[in-house]
Amino acid sequence: MLPKQPLACLVLILTSALSVTSLPGDTGKGRRKVVHVLEDDTGAVIVQTAPGKVVTHRGGSITLPCRFHHEPENTDPDHIRIKWTKVTDTLQFEDVFVALGRQQRVFGSYRGRVFLEEAGPGDASVIIHNVTLEDYGRYECEVTNDMEDDTGFVNLDLEGVVFPYYPHEGRYRLNYHQAEDACKQQDAILASHSQLHKAWLEGLDWCNAGWLEDGSVQYPIAHPRDQCGRKDSPAGVRNYGYRHKESERYDCFCFTSKLDGKVYFLKRFKKVNYADATKACVRDGSAVAKVGQLYAAWKFQLLDRCEAGWLEDGSIRYPIVNPRSRCGGSHPGVRHLGFPDKKFRLYGVYCFRKNEDKEAGAPEIKQIPQDGFTAEKNGNSIPVNATRLI
């Protein structure tokens, strides 16, 4: 038994999910990892956390784990404040959740999606339902007891796919903010360095530099060649460093995850131009698929179709899971045939239909009323005092 010390609180961050809703077959995810609690010569407690991340996919549910121990053990729980924030940039934070005793408040886009796990004394973990692409990143858990506090961090990762993107205007036409918008328009976000590095490890090879979410410009080379830096240079992710976000222009690398819907090739008797392709998808109860949606379908649906088709941005692409010579080469991927004339060139079309029914087995999400009260399990309502909680 550990000797009691006059420590206000120690936050134990478990960097592996205690409760995860994952893709089928992910039996290795969500397992509890070992946390070692030691003592030094002074009797003070030292906390060592196991390395790792919590991993889910868009639309899933995930626990951001955080536990704390406070002395003395009979401290009034109403005096303990739990606060979660997202680290959006160096020394910049976005409020996510705060609780003081039974009073709770959720902020911004997290409203209606974030709740305390409440798995017993000392549990400051929160559950995020219906995870979005924007939820990806680093979170801080802060536990405060009167004037003392301690913090820890959890990294939320998403299963997904990175893809290079440039608009119909051509290569190297996007500043940083335009690159952000371009990814969003294709149902994606700007990729992080770690996401691009992982994609490179999985074989992504692209010879044009693109923006990443941190403002750096990089590109992955799996097969060095003279036209991509020098043939005798080692393979790797080439880095131009942080560039001027307003004046400099590059392509971009986008990241997307599992879809809440399905991409399919619309079977028709004849090929059509872009306008007729759009109308055909609408008549079928769908919309023309975005580039990010086609990549997600290729990655998660294993969509394999050796027929070129229109996408929403006016490009022509098709997904190949099982490579064959007549379908564009020996490697899997999404083939890109450029941006042809929308009026006169004729192709098939890829459509996207959003799921209408709630996913089977998805957790029921409690909604926080907009009148400043948060619902409790016993049916009573507790007023939320934003000033006290923050």
Image (cartoon, rainbow, N blue to C red):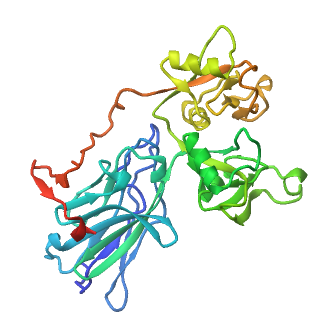
Return the x and y of residue 321 as percentages of the image width and height.
66, 30
Please tell me which residue is depicted at 19% across the width and 60% down the height of the picture.
384
Q: Is residue 255 visible?
A: no
Q: Most extreme residue toward the bottom, as rendered?
A: 42
Instruction: Using the image as rendered, state which of residue 43 and residue 251 is in the foreground.
Output: 251
Return the x and y of residue 272 as percentages of the image width and height.
68, 16
The quadrant of the image that shows the N terminus is bottom left
- Asked where in the image residue 263 lies, by quadrant, the reply is top right
Please tell me which residue is depicted at 77% across the width and 50% down the height of the picture.
208
Q: Is residue 17 visible?
A: yes
Q: Is residue 123 above or below residue 48?
A: above
Instruction: Using the image as rendered, state which of residue 20 and residue 238 is in the foreground.
Output: 238
Instruction: Using the image as rendered, state which of residue 50 and residue 94 is in the foreground.
Output: 94
Q: Is residue 370 left or right of residue 336?
A: left
Q: Is residue 32 above or below residue 69?
A: above
Instruction: Using the image as rendered, state which of residue 64 and residue 39 is in the foreground.
Output: 64
Q: Is residue 302 above or below residue 375?
A: above
Q: Is residue 98 above or below residue 2?
A: above
The quadrant of the image that shows the C terminus is bottom left
Please tell me which residue is depicted at 54% across the width and 40% down the height of the picture.
187
Return the x and y of residue 362 as percentages of the image width and height.
33, 37
Q: Is residue 182 left or right of residue 2?
A: right
Return the x and y of residue 275 as percentages of the image width and height.
63, 21
